[in-house]
Image (cartoon, helix red, strand yellow):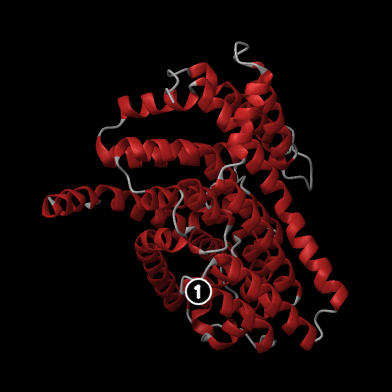
């Protein structure tokens, strides 16, 4: 099939979305704020995308309405989009029942009870990393751990913004690497790669940043002196499902099996420990899947808008700009990073940013010879960097609200996201995959 010619006008739906969503967010967050209302959540992301889709349909009158519907159907019916939607549902069910059974709180308290009191802040970082990898959600991790971090800071006289920032950093580490995170699902499925392959690439970038963060936190903990944390109550049985899911995911077991077994195990543990009844088990699974509905609807809408933009030549316009601006494979990686970063800063939602940038990033990776697993890693990591830094994102807004501080006060202590960005840029600069591919091709010849 012949590729459409580059057409900048085809990008109008995305511009409309950004003006509506970003514009209303800035207005209600900073110009005309309402107490108790997060400005970037006044305008629903779904409504903004629906309006953008209407704009896309009004464009290119030469193409019939039926052909536009067919283009949308092709975009929505893509295998990777379908798999993504199913995984979102299962991840929601697991998250709902595991949280309701008390697993998240018990896991956090169990780890806090083990960690020496003097190293409470480094301990919070490790706990946030582990729990977010097991839960697959940074927001869920922050919601569970920030109240604990608040009580730790109060009782031990620790720096509250630093404690909260440590939890946020750890939450973004796990969200970036978790096999059941919606960002991982979106990044891998838009590029058609296995989660374990993306994990291996990601881990080499995220681990140095995490180690550097931990060293900084340990040094600060030593300088701060002793702290008295007291005792934390937990039920070790309630923590088991999270550890099982974490270990199974790291072993590379199919995500559907991991989530299915995790959901059943959480239900059994909840019933045995009486933290759940049969009724609350089913209702918590229902609540968990409901929490995924907006993400699923956004995925469908973005797939439709993306299909029409591609049909009209919008993708070709972006590729044309990146070809002119960036040179070589490393330039292509930076182009993907820039595209993802702008999407995340504009939407304040890393999953939405990945779903929007994913199809275009796939075209860029094919054009510049970038491995799909590397592209998936770049999408996920760049979006997590900015999502963990922007003061109007859900992560910082929720963390600030729970700790009763401002989101801006957290930013100076966000060591992990800033170090992750440094490691990410260094990994692109030092990338040698091109040379390795050339050598392997020469040997095979």
The residue drawn where x is 77% and y is 66% is: 285
State whether residue 338 appears in this view.
no
Residue 387: percent from left, percent from top: 54, 49
Q: Quadrant of the N terminus?
A: top left
Residue 412: percent from left, percent from top: 49, 54
The residue drawn where x is 72% and y is 45% is: 38
Along the horizontal axis of the image, is 278 left or right of 42?
Answer: right
Residue 192: percent from left, percent from top: 46, 50
On the image, which quarter does residue 133 sit in? bottom right
Along the horizontal axis of the image, is 59 left or right of 210?
Answer: right
Query: Which residue has dot 1 on it?
Result: 126
Along the horizontal axis of the image, is 149 left or right of 380?
Answer: right
Measured along the vertical axis of the image, is residue 388 above or below residue 156? Answer: above
Outermost residue toward the top in this view: 62
Measured along the vertical axis of the image, is residue 100 above or below residue 318? Answer: below
Is disc 1 surrounded by few (<14), some (14 to 19) or many (20+) residues within 10 Å?
Answer: many
Residue 259: percent from left, percent from top: 62, 69
Q: Nearer the viewer, residue 342 or 180?
A: 180
């Amino acid at each position: 099939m012949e590729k459409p010619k580059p057409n900048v006008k085809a990008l109008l739906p995305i511009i409309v979305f950004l003006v509506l969503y970003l514009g209303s967010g800035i207005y209600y967050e900073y110009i005309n704020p309402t107490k108790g209302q997060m400005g970037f959540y006044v305008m629903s992301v779904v409504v903004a995308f629906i309006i953008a889709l209407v704009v896309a349909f009004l464009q290119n009158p030469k193409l019939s309405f039926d052909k536009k519907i067919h283009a949308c159907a092709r975009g929505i019916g893509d295998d990777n989009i379908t798999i993504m939607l199913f995984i979102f549902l299962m991840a929601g069910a697991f998250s709902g029942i595991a949280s309701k059974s008390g697993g998240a709180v018990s896991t956090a308290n169990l780890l806090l009870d083990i960690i020496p009191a003097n190293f409470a802040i480094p301990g919070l970082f490790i706990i946030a990393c582990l729990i977010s990898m097991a839960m697959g959600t940074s927001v869920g991790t922050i919601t569970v751990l920030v109240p604990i971090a608040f009580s730790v800071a109060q009782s031990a006289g620790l720096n509250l913004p630093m404690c909260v920032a440590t939890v946020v950093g750890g939450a973004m580490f796990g969200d970036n690497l978790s096999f059941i995170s919606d960002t991982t699902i979106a990044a891998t499925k838009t590029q058609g790669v296995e989660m374990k392959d993306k994990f291996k690439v990601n881990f080499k970038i995220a681990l140095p940043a995490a180690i550097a963060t931990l060293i900084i936190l340990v040094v600060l903990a030593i300088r701060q002196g002793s702290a008295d944390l007291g005792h934390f109550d937990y039920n070790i049985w309630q923590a088991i499902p999270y550890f099982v899911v974490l270990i199974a995911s790291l072993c590379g077991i199919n995500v559907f099996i991991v989530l299915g077994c995790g959901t059943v195990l959480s239900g059994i543990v909840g019933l045995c420990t009486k933290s759940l009844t049969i009724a609350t088990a089913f209702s918590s699974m229902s609540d968990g899947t409901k929490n995924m509905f907006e993400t699923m609807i956004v995925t469908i809408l973005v797939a439709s808008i993306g299909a029409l933009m591609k049909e009209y030549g919008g993708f070709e316009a972006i590729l044309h700009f990146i070809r002119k601006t960036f040179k070589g494979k490393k330039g292509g990686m930076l182009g993907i990073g820039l595209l993802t970063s702008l999407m995340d800063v504009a939407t304040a939602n890393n999953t939405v940013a990945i779903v929007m940038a994913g199809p275009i990033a796939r075209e860029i990776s094919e054009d510049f010879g970038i491995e799909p697993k590397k592209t998936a890693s770049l999408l996920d990591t760049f979006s997590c960097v900015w999502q963990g830094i922007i003061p109007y994102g859900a992560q910082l807004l929720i963390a600030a609200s729970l700790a009763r501080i401002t989101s801006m006060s957290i930013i100076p202590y966000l060591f992990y996201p800033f170090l992750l960005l440094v490691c990410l840029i260094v990994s692109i600069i030092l990338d040698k995959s091109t040379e390795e591919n050339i050598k392997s091709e020469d040997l095979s010849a």
